[in-house]
Amino acid sequence: MMTVRVDLNISLDGFMTTTDQTPESPFGDDWGRLVATYTGTRTFRERVLHDTSGEGTTGLDDAYAKEYFAEVGAEVMGAGMFGLHTYPDDPDWRGWWGEDPPFHVPVFVLTHRARPAIEFADGTTFHFLTATPAEALDRALAVADGKDVRIGGGATVVRDFLRAGLVDRLHVAIVPILLGRGIRLWDDLRGLEAGYDIAVEAAPSGVTHLTFRR
């Protein structure tokens, strides 16, 4: 059954963004700490780094990484996730992922500035929209071919979709680090748990996987 879903990592103190970025280090050191368990999985290495050596962790964290990529028919993301906040005036910017993005489906990028669509040979096409969450979701559902629509991020976009009640499944990987500042997932989402079944699994890595399902 088609679902609208979110998968993300947060710190113990609830932050899903980091604040130590610099022009020389656009992701910063803290981002690496926040996503280290996910990027260390065999699935991430295969799907994003195109590493077919078999290296990478398996087990529960890898199972969730596999689920992240499975049965996705379209994606919605914000301008920051695509990189437009970092490269707003570069007409040749094609995203962080090079010429083989790991999506392989239509991706709808929410932005305030119109840009022509960008197509890749691997099936990824970035469409740039000025739209509400509901409008963007309608566009994504129309091309998802009955598969899931993933709300990829960033933090503000995820919170907008949650506030609008548009998310069917929310998977949160709680990473055992403290960030102290950033954008916190749960702020102003009091009572979000109502209407969801909640499951919790603890991985040997120390990550706690929390899943909300309608």
Image (spheres, rainbow, N blue to C red):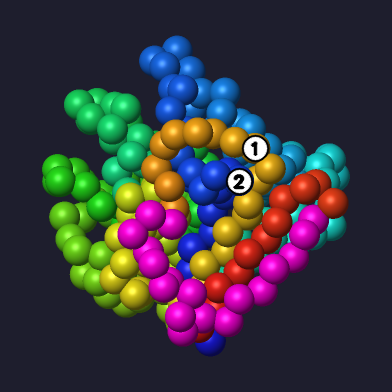
Provide the residue designation for mark 1: 177
Residue 76 point in image, percent of width and height: 36, 59
The residue tagged with tag 2: helix, strand or loop? Answer: loop
Residue 14 visible in the displayed image: yes
Please state the extent of the stretch shown in magenta in the rendering: 186-203
Provide the residue designation for mark 2: 12
Is 3 in front, or is 8? 8
Look at 42% across and 37% down and name the residue there.
Answer: 182
Left or right, residue 158 beside residue 122 = left
Residue 136 visible in the displayed image: no
In magenta segment, residue 192: yes
Q: CA distance from mark 2 to mark 1?
A: 6 Å
Is 106 in front, or is 11? 11
Left or right, residue 123 beside residue 136 = right
Residue 80 point in image, percent of width and height: 33, 39
Q: Amino acid at mark 1?
A: Ile
Mark closest to the chain's N terminus, 2 or 1: 2
Look at 46% across and 84% down and name the residue there.
Answer: 195
Above or below, comparing residue 9 to residue 192 in the picture: above
Look at 16% across and 55% down and name the residue there.
Answer: 130
Residue 198 point in image, percent of width and height: 61, 76
Above or below, comparing residue 92 to residue 155 in the picture: above
